[in-house]
Image (cartoon, grey):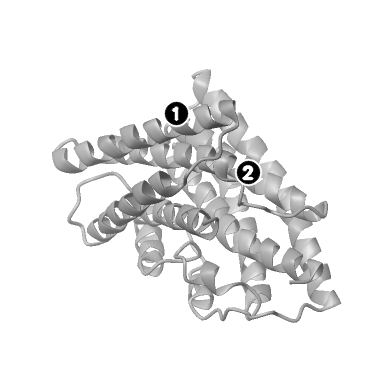
Amino acid sequence: MADDSRFVVLSLELHLFFSRIMKEHSLFLKAGFTPADSSFSDEAELFKQKFEELLYCAVHLSDGVVSRSVLCSGEVITEFTACAEWQTQQFTGIGINQEITAHEACLHHGENPCVSAQLCANVHQLNRNAIELLDGLIALKECILQNVLSCKMFTMNYPLLIEHIIREAKLYRTYVCKLENGMDLDYRNMQQTEQFWNQIMMEHAMFIRGLLDPSENELIETSDTFAKDYARLLSDCRKTLDLSITIDTKASLNETLKFRDFKSAGTKGIQECRIRSVILPLLADHVLREANHYIRLLTDCK
């Protein structure tokens, strides 16, 4: 694939996954504020709208361009996304542009796409817009975290969750900046990628454990087991980084495939009101998509 084509494809695939993640982070932040912090709620709403606009643009530019593996991975949308958005809007009163999901469901992949100079220029502008938005969203998240940790603010979101979404936003920004600076996104060196995403998966398990109703003993125990399993994988990954040893990704892949199935069943159970929790349907779908994204990275590196 020519350099311009690779730049365009990698950029658009990055935005299809991460800009949706960012708009949902903004929604989750807004849903967690109390009336005392209405100004923060308004700011979160603004970022939600801005990242929806970014995602809408990325979807428009992606048709016939991005790879089959990304569109089929379940990281862009899942079978649950449309319902999860509708339910979450009903529960929270926070508006969600559900037309974007409908458009994403109709995207076509590209085989050796023809990338015009205009498309390349549009993607460069999309990347610059993303960096500017991410600078603002990261600053907002860091301000919220500082306020929470200094007892100046109460939110329904765990401090660890706020730290978690700051790390994801910073990773997104790093990748966009690399592409804009003419660098490739080479996922084949998996140590750092595994370290990052194993920590994300471990924290997902911890969040799920903490947001389930106390009566859901079996699901709580399963979540706790996943958290411990990922903690072990994370420890092993750190050791290989220290020793500069090449790692085998099979353990992380097998664990994440199992966790993906657990998340998928949980998302379905939450949507059908069979699981007691304080987990928004869109949050359940959100963490499922992140597992699907990680599985693709692990699979593509083989």
Residue in the picture at 47% in, 44% down: 248
Residue assigned mark 2: 171
Closest to the observer, 256 or 201: 256
Q: CA distance from mark 1 to mark 2?
A: 21 Å
Residue tagged by mark 1? 235
Judge from the rendering whether residue 65 lies leftward or rightward of residue 163; answer left or right: right
Q: Name which residue lies at 49% across and 43% down.
A: 197
Q: Is residue 23 above or below residue 196?
A: below
Instruction: In this rendered view, identify the residue nearer to me: 151 or 57.
Output: 57
Q: Which tag, 1 or 2, sits closer to the chain's start? A: 2
| Amino acid found under the numbered disc labelled 2 | Leu
Could you tell me residue 286's position as x and y percent? 43, 54
Q: Could you tell me residue 194's position as x and y percent?
A: 51, 42
Q: Residue at x 63, y 60 (%)?
A: 15
Indicate the amino acid at tag 1. Answer: Ser
Question: Is residue 54 visible in the rendered structure shown here?
Answer: yes
| Residue 280 appears in the figure | no
- Please give the name of the residue rendered at 55% of the width and 54% of the height, measured from the top-left corner: 23
